[in-house]
Image (tube, helix red, strand yellow):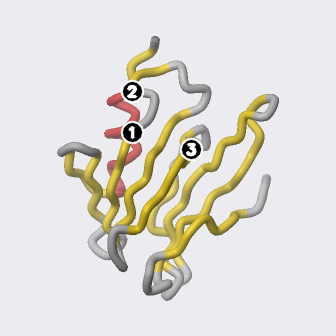
Amino acid sequence: MAAMEILSTSPNQRFALQARVWEAGNSQWVLSPQLWDVQRNAALFAFDEQRWSVEADHWLSDTSVRLSLRKYPGNHRPQSIQVEIDCASLQATVLPAINTTVAKLEFVLESMLHSV
């Protein structure tokens, strides 16, 4: 299994977005994300299903990050989902307005996918 790579860090460097990068198919890369608390040296969130991939990220504050996520192989609608996660409170919002906890986030995202 590939090692974790740091994709970005929060402005105050307390939190990091890491990913396990693996090739799912010929030149089809999956970046399985994990949010990490650098100060506590502990994972805050990681998908159980490794086919979830982060397409883009943007730190909104010292504790909040917006992620654009997709699930390989992409034969679903919506093709990508935007999520904002507050690393301090462990709360998440699936945009535009589905609130949940990071503990329930994967379940909520899975329930939103529809096969095409």
Query: Disc 2, disc 3: CB below 8 Å?
Result: no
Q: Position of residue 58 (x, y in %)?
A: 43, 62
SS assignment at label 1: strand
Dot 2: few (<14), some (14–19), or many (≥20) neighbours within 10 Å? some
Q: Closer to the N terminus: mark 2 or mark 3?
A: 3
Q: Amino acid at mark 2?
A: Pro
Q: CA distance from mark 2 to mark 1?
A: 7 Å
SS assignment at label 2: loop
What residue do we see at 61% from left, 26% from top?
73
What residue do we see at 61% from left, 43% from top?
50
Q: For residue 7, which quarter of the picture? A: bottom right
Q: Amino acid at mark 3?
A: Ser
Q: In the rendered image, which residue does mark 1 sit on?
A: 81
Query: Disc 3, disc 1: CB below 8 Å?
Result: no
Dot 3: few (<14), some (14–19), or many (≥20) neighbours within 10 Å? many
Which of the labelled discs sits on residue 78, or is there none? 2
Q: In the rendered image, which residue does mark 3 sit on?
A: 53
Q: CA distance from mark 2 to mark 3?
A: 14 Å
Apparent side of residue 54 relative to residue 19 in the rendered image (left or right): left
Q: For residue 52, which quarter of the picture? A: top right
